[in-house]
Structure formats: C-alpha cells, structure tokens
Image (spheres, helix red, strand yellow):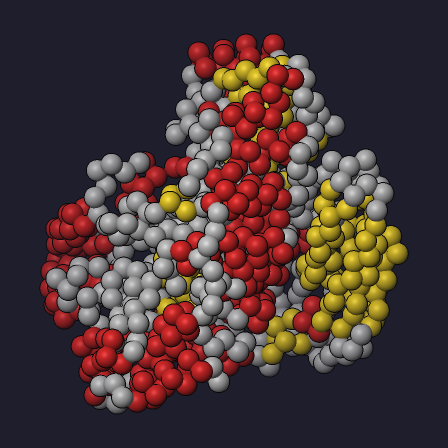
Amino acid sequence: MRATYERAEQIVSRLTTDEKIRLVSGKDAWTTEALDEHGVPSIMLTDGPHGVRKQTASTDHLGINESVPATCFPPAVTLGSTWDPALIEEVGSALGRESRANDVSVLLGPGLNIKRHPAGGRNFEYFSEDPFVSGKMAAALVRGIQSQGVGACLKHYAANNQEFFRMSCDSVVDDRTLNELYLTGFEIAVKESDPWTVMCSYNKINGEHADINRDLLTDKLRDDWGFDGLVMSDWFAVSDRALGICAGLDLEMPGSGGTWDAQVKDAHAKGLLTTAELDLAVTRVIDLALRVSEADGTSQFDPATHHELARRAAAAGTVLLTNDGILPLERTGSIAVIGAFAKKPRYQGAGSSLVNPTQVDTFLSALRAAVGDAAVVHYAPGYDATTGETEEALLDEVRDAARKADVVIVLAGLPQSYESEGFDRPHLRLPDGHTAVIAAALDVNDRTVVALQNGSPVELPWADRPAAIVEAYLGGQASGSALADVLLGDATPGGRLAESFPISAADLPADRDFARHPKQVEYREGLFVGYRYHDTAGIPARFPFGHGLTYTAFDYSGLSVRKSGEGYTVTVTVTNAGPRAGSDVVQVYVRDPECAAYRPAKELKGFAKVHLEPGTSEKVTLKLDRRAFSVWDVRSQEWRVEPGTFEILVGASSTDIRARRTIKVEFGEAVSPAHGPAAFVANDNEFRLMLGREIPEAQGTLPYHRDSTVADLKETAAGRVVAGMMLQQAKKAFDTSEADATTLAMFDAATREAPLRMVAMGSSGKLTLAGLDRLIRTLNLTSSKAWRARS
Ligand code: BGC
C-alpha cells in the first residue's frame, strides 16, 4: 500500500465526523479543504486538458473568466490524430511542468468520451470514435502529466456523448455496447497509466446518475480494473451526496457551500452511510492531497520550448485528406492566402478547456516568414472570422486574388460559435460563407488547396474539386506555423483520422436519436459507431477512419501472425519507398467473420507510428492479446473469445487494407448469442433484446423534483416565475456583459438545462436543499392548475 494512503488512514482515525464531512466536498471552485492541525493540505485542481486554465480573479467552470497565460497545446482531437503516444506523453509532461509552476496539483484531463456522433459539441476535447485509440492516447497523456508529480483526471466517466441536456439526460445503452465501446477506453487508460483521479460525468446511465453509480465507480473502476485513486464529481454533478459516497464518489467538486453536509450527516447518523464508507472517501481525499504535495517533478520550463512542442504536435496531428501532387508547395511565384482564419486562427474549442495562450502564431505571418523573398503572398479575408459570413465585395476580392496567383490556399472551417462545450452542432456543414469562398476560389483557379480548422468532422460535398485538402483541426497556439510547416513540406503531415468523416450526418445510425430528447438518449445503434458502422453497412465515409496521406509512399511486406500464449504477435515490415522522409501509422484490425454475438466488420486492436527516411524500413511488432478477440458476454458478465476463424487485417486506414492473414483461434469458450440492430438502428423489439429489459419511457416534466431542469420550470406558469428569478441570479453570478456569442450560447444552455439541485449547489448556501424541496412542493401543488391554464 502507498505510504501516503497509510498515513491518510491514520489521520482519518483521528478526525471527527464533521471534519470528515468537510473534507469530502471542495472548499471553493478549484481547491479542496485543508485540515492544517492534522497535516492535510488544500490542493488546487484546474482545467485542462490541453493547457493550464488557472483562473485569476473571478471563477467559473464555463471558460468565461480569464486565466493565467499558459501554452495552449492542440486539443485532444488533434493529439488523437497523431496516433503517437510517445509525442502525447511529451505534451503531457509539459502540461505537468506548467501545472506545477502554477501550483496546480491536478490537471482536469484528459477527456476520453467516445465520439458517438460527429456533431457532439465537445468532440474537439475527445480523441476518437474508437475506444482503443482513445484509451491509448489518454494513457499517454496521463503518464506524461503524472511524470511531473501532478495528478491527471480521466473524464467524463461515462457515456456522456452529447452536450444536449448533459446534466440530467439518461443515456440508455445496452450492457455490451457500454462495455465494448464506452468503457473500454477508460479501462485501458486506468490499466496502462494509473491515473490519480477520475471525474464522473453529469448524465444518467441507464436511469442512474453517474455520481451514484456503484457499478461504474466501484465495481468496474476499482474492483475490475484496479483503480486506486480518487473519484471526483464533475462540477456540480452531485445528485445525492450520501448515496454517492456509498457508490464510490470520493470528492464533491466544487464546494457547494455545505449544501449536502446535513444530508450526509443525517445518513451517517441513521446508519445509511456507514463510518467505513465515509472513511474510505475521506482517506482517498487525504491520500491525494499528500500524494500530490509530496510528489517529485519539475516546475522549470521554457515557454519557447513548449511553444515549439505545441507546433510539432500540431503538425503531427495534421491530416492530408487529398493531394493531387500540389503539396508540398513550391516556394516560388505568387501565393494567394484566402480566409480570415489566416490572421485570426481557430485553434482551440470553447468552454471549460479554454486556455489563455502565451502567444499565437498566425498562418499568414508564418508563411510569409517561411517563403521570404522567394514568393509573393497576397491575402484576402473572404469571410468574417467570427461569424463565417461573406458578402459580394469579399467574394470579388477572393476571385481577384485567386485568379492572379500560381497557387491558392483557402483557410476555412468552423468559427468558434459553431462548436463548444454546452451545446451540440445542429448540422455538420461549414458556414455558407466559407463554402462560398471555397467555390469562388475554385471557380477561377484549379490550383487551390483547402486547409480546414475545425474541431470535428464537417460535410465536404465539394471534396473532389480542390487540388488538396488538409485537415489541420484545432492546432493550439502554434497552429499557424505548424500549418505552414506542413504545406511547405518542412514537417510531414503526420495525422491520420481518428474519426470517420461521413458524407452526410443523415447516414449515421446514431443520428436518429442524437440530442433530440432532453430526458433520454437511446443508443439504438449499439456498436455501430464510426467505422464500425460504415464498414459493416457498406456505406462509405467521405474520409474513412485511419485515413491520411503523406508526401512519400509506404509499402508493407512480410506480414506474419504468430501464436504467442493466449494471443498473437503480428509483425510487418514498413518501407518508405518514396522520395521524402515521413511517418506512417500501421493499423491492425481484427475481423471475426462468425460469432454467436453480432460483430462489426472489423475493429482496431493495434497500431504503431513509424518515422522513416526514404529507402529505409522498420519491422513493426504488435501484440494481440486475448482481449483483442473478445466480446463482452452479457450473460456471464465477462470477456469471452469464441474459438474459430479470425482475420487479421493490416492497413493504412479502415478501408485501405494492405495485407491479411486468417488464423484459427483455439482458446476461448462459448459466447452467448447476442443480437444487434439488424438494420443498424434497433427497432423496439431489437432494442428491448439488446437492453434485456423494457425500453424505459422518457420521463415527463411533472411532477417537479430535484432533477427537473430550469427548462422544465418554464412549462408551467408558476415555474416560469421561479425560472425567471433563477436566471436573474445566474446573470448576477456570472458577468457575461463582455461575453462573445459562443460564451452566451453556452451560458444560455447551462442555465436552461441546469437541474434544480444544481441551482441550489451553486447558490452559495442561499438556496438550501430543504428550501428547494419546499419550493418544489409548492410548484407541484400549483402546477396541475397551472398546467390546465396553459393548455
Ligand atoms: C466540465 C469539466 C470541467 C469542469 C470544471 C465542467 O462543466 O464538464 O470538463 O473539468 O466543468 O471546469
């Protein structure tokens, strides 16, 4: 046992119940309570994940108020596209150093929720649609952060895959899908990086809030996976503190001014919450405080070096989607740079992860500096950077500039207001203004390259027109120079898509029920998310999972698949057969052509990134363990392998399979039959079978309860009065007078969707739970009459 844990236990044995109750809730927005007389320090936890967001004066958890300057590394979408755990670990360690320099003990990241639907508002903060990639990348970031003695935090656990009513919506998902898709990434990260903390999500999972979900917080996380750190709540996610402690939620964050103290005390007095249960939570809080206070690490760093690392990471996550040979660019002639993002880059997402960068490189300056006198660079903004809108005069300028140039580079993508924590995207289209600018350039010059800055997939119906398309994603503060590096060939476009780009959102099975009902989201597509859907259904993505071109050419040869214990070793030789240095990502998929349980056409089970000079080769060895062949067997509640034929597919994307071997797996046992959605979206009968129970009916609005939202209040006359008052309070608490459109939209969603218990928690003790319960009773008494009056 850890020495700090043992000491924590000794300290707990000397505490009074009141002291214990104090410790299991935070002190304020970002710190924990101290007990100086017992040697328990207060520690600071801040966002995260791709930079340190330590707020200076006023605090909030929505990214509204200012924070200290810190390196803004590329967000997870871009880090995920690097497929390079070693590089991500380097970024993690830089994050650890900056955290330490700012006295931050726990950095709230990585986020590793699965991108169930590309319109998820927070997808830029997550790595992938695939749990294997998500888990490996998250593990790397955690190892890096913690190498500096700073705790990392896996979030948001679990099945939080949309923003719409994220604080109370119920994710109805069958057990197999939950385990195979939505929990596996967390499991990998826990087992491979030993994170010091985990954050539970806001939502419900199959009817139970994440904060009181013992199955997830204790049985899976600790008993099955071996997690031995601390679980904290997402900010104000607590739905029942006493139950949460029993379930394994150790720390309530932020402090809610003692909102739950009386409830915990009462439950303890009545024996509903045992001393042993309370002590366990307190021990873990103290253990974390001692652990981070005593851990070794360095707070020394050079901001310029971190900026260079951010630049390298951005280039490594940049995905070359198409290229007719125009890239890398020649440094001669005249280049037209079009698009306001060239001067005002889109480089990170909005919300709690918003970092105040130490500097920001713009593409226009970086390109001009790189080409010097060798080429002339003209610029036309084309559209408004904030709104994405254009007008005829701007389009005329675009055509003029494009016509005269030898090559045109259009920067397009999503303005900040299009994607943010707090709300999902209503569609996957680019702003009309951006589309018009791209078309205007293409109409007059075929030698047009489109570079995209956005945090999640967009529909690209014109994809076959440009000479090249580069997905630069959100590149962090060095995005501008990294893009210039890639376009000029000073860096290799190292990225591969860690998510599919659908032709249209309407193609996707998850689209039917994504962000539609405020109370419930049904995961009727089961395992058919991303490439698992496209490749099984034969509905191609515009750009498939794993895709990314290079400036050189890689050959695969000598594939061998050998049995080793209860698993296999895959070896393949990768050769750089082209003219330039470059990096490649070897991807290994497993296909199970016949199984009692339904299976997607293929699933990623291994990958390796290699960097090769022209003419050189590397022998890549990847292990496929038992788990690589398993399904989650719902009946026996364990991972099982059905013996028989499997295919091992090695390729450069989920659809570019270069070599395959068929093997006969002899280990394993019978797998219980399990049916999925025959046509990719389960009908009622199929969904019932997948769930193993009746499909729950989505909750109605009345009667009101603690989990009702402010939006629910608006359904009744009396409720509307209360909602109005609550809104006024929220506006007083958060100064949004200078907020931009994105922040206002997020603020609006957060206040509308807030459950009433959250309003109480955020009221600094003004609205107690008892007061809230009285209010709810009154509203319910009046509501039936009000309800009639309304209709
Ligand atoms: C977000 C978390 C974040 C926390 C603190 C929440 O709203 O969901 O990801 O760490 O706020 O800012």
Q: Nearer the viewer, residue 415 or 295?
A: 295
Counting from the top left corner in percent of width and height, residue 175 is at 53, 70
In the displayed structure, would residue 275 be above or below residue 540? below
Q: Which residue occupies 74% across, 67% down?
A: 623
- The quarter of the picture where residue 458 lies is top right
Q: Which residue occupies 37% across, 51% down?
A: 53
Counting from the top left corner in percent of width and height, residue 503 is at 60, 39
Asked if residue 733 lies left or right of residue 87, the reply is left
Counting from the top left corner in percent of width and height, residue 45 is at 36, 61
In the displayed structure, would residue 782 be above or below residue 187? above
Q: Nearer the viewer, residue 188 or 173?
A: 188
Q: Nearer the viewer, residue 490 or 239?
A: 490
Asked if residue 329 lies left or right of residue 685, the reply is right
Counting from the top left corner in percent of width and height, residue 183 is at 53, 67
Q: Which residue occupies 60% across, 26% down?
A: 370
In the displayed structure, would residue 622 be above or below residue 437? below
Asked if residue 291 lies left or right of residue 274, the reply is right
Asked if residue 497 lies left or right of residue 28, the reply is right
Can see residue 536? yes
Q: Nearer the viewer, residue 47 or 40?
A: 40
